[in-house]
Image: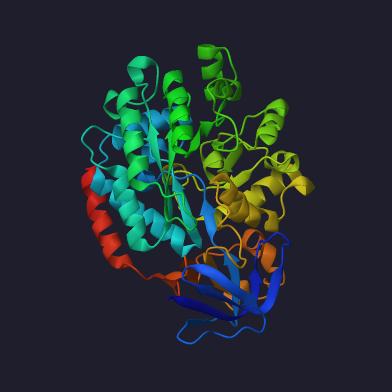
Amino acid sequence: MSVLFIKNCRAIVTCDDADRVLQNASLCITDGVITDMGAHIQPPFGARVIEGADMLCYPGLINTHHHLYQMFSRNLPQVQNMELFDWLKTLYEIWKGLDETVVRYSTLTGLGTLLKNGCTTCFDHHYVFPAGAGDLIGAQFEAAGELGMRMVCSRGSMDLSKKDGGLPPDSVVQTIDAILRDSERVIDAYHDPSFGSMRQVVLAPCSPFSVSAALLKESALLARQKGVRLHTHLCETKDEENYTLQKCGLRPLAYMESLGWIGKDVWYAHGIHFNDEELRLLAKTGTGVAHCPASNMKLSSGVARIPDMLSLGVPVGLAVDGSASNDGSSLLEEMRVCYLLHRLTYGDKAPSGYEVLKMATRGSARLLGRDDIGSLAVGKCGDLFLVNAKRVELAGAAFDPKSMLATVGVHGVDYTVVQGHVCVNEGRLTNMSEETIARDAEKVVEKYLG
C-alpha cells in the first residue's frame, strides 16, 4: 500500500461542488486515491509526509489541447509574423521529418515543463504521421509513463494534401482505410477507460481544411463504436470559415454537425468564431471548447467568446495549444494570459481568477469525460500541486488563494503529485534527470532541424 500525507497546508483550494477552501488542513492519498481531508487528521503509519505549513494546495491542472511534437519548432524566425494557414504550410515542411525519437524527446520536454507548472493530465493532439515514422503514439505513452504523467493521446489524421486542396505535403497524409485501421489498433492497444486511467485515446482528425468529409464521418462512427471521444480544431480563423462556406456551403459548425460531430463526447479546439446561434447549440448538446488564449493571440486568430460560453453553460476547458504557436508549455502561464485577455476584452463580464482556475481543472476534466480528476475530494484521484506562499514573489499576494494563480501569476510549483506519486519535488522532476533530457533533446533538435 502506498500512502502520501500532505500535512497542515495553509490552504487547500478544492474546486469541489461547494467551492470549499480548507484552512490549515491535511490531505491523505492511499493507493492513488484521496481517502481523507480535513483540519485534524493524522498521517497513517508508514506514510510519506510532505510538510505543507506554508503551502497552497490545488487540484492538478488539465491541459485539453496540445501538439507536443511542436516543442522542437519553437521560436523559428521564418514563421514569427505569419497567420495560421501560411504558418502551417511553412512548418509542415519541417514536421514531415518527424520520427519516434523526435516525438519521444519533444514529449519528454513538453510534459516535463507542464509537470513543473502543476499540470497532471495532458491531452495531445497528434495528427502528423510521416510514412515509416514508427509508433508515434506508443512513443508518447512511453515518455509520459517515465515521467509519471496522466496522458490522453489522439490518433489524429489528415487525408487531404496540397494536391487535394489541403495544406500539408503528400508525405504526411494517409488514406482513410489506413487511418481507420491504425486508429482501431491504437485504441485496442492503449485505451483504458477505467477509473484513474493513466492512458486514454481520442480520435482527432486535424481540421476541416485537411480532412475529407468521409474521414470525419467514419472517424465519428468508429469512435462511438469503440467508446472513445472525438476532437478537432474548429472555428479558429476566418480563413477556415471561408473554406467550409466555399467548399461545402456551410459554416464550420453546421458542416461538422452534418457529419455527426456534435454531442457530449465531442470537444473542439479554439472555437473563436462561433455566432450566437452556434453557441446555443453547443450548450444544448454539451459540445465542448478547449480555450487556447496565448496561441490565439500569437497567430492573430481572435478572442474566443468565453464569457458568453460560460454564461450559456458550454463546457469550456483550458489548453496551451502547440508549442510552436505558444512557444511555451505552461498552463499556469495560460491561466494568467486567459484572465488578462478577457479582462481587456470583456471588462466586468470576464471570468474571475477563480473561474479561470476551474476552467483549467473541473472544466478541462469535463471535456475529457473524466469525473475522477479535476477537483480535490475524498474518492477522487490524488492529482494536485503545491505552491509555497512564502516565496518572495508572493509576499502579500496570497489573501485570496482561489484567484491568485490567474490574477498574480506563479512561475513553477514546489510539488506536483499524480495518482499519489510525487513527480515534482521542490521544483524538480523526480522520475528522470532534467539535465539528461535537455542534453539529449538538444542533440535530437540539431539533427531534426539540420
Q: In the figure, is residue 341 to the left or right of 114? A: right
Q: In the figure, is residue 57 to the left or right of 218? A: right
Is residue 4 visible in the rendered structure shown here?
yes
Relative to 310, residue 235 above or below: above
Q: Position of residue 173 (x, y in %)?
A: 32, 26
**In front: 278, or 68?**
278
Relative to 111, residue 154 above or below: above
Q: Tell me where residue 262 sits by quadrant.
A: top right
Q: In the figure, is residue 404 to the left or right of 298? A: right
Q: Position of residue 294 (x, y in %)?
A: 54, 46
Q: Position of residue 408 (x, y in %)?
A: 64, 63
Q: Quadrant of the C terminus?
A: top left
**In front: 153, or 394?**
153
Relative to 177, residue 104 above or below: below
Q: Tell me where residue 57 sits by quadrant.
A: bottom right
**In front: 277, or 299?**
277
Relative to 450, residue 274 above or below: above
- How many labels sit on residues? 0
Residue that appears at 74% across and 39% down: 312
Name the colouring of the figure. Answer: rainbow
Q: Position of residue 196 (x, y in %)?
A: 48, 58
Q: Quadrant of the N terminus?
A: bottom left
**In front: 391, or 425?**
425
Residue that appears at 52% across and 73% down: 29
Is residue 175 visible in the rendered structure shown here?
no
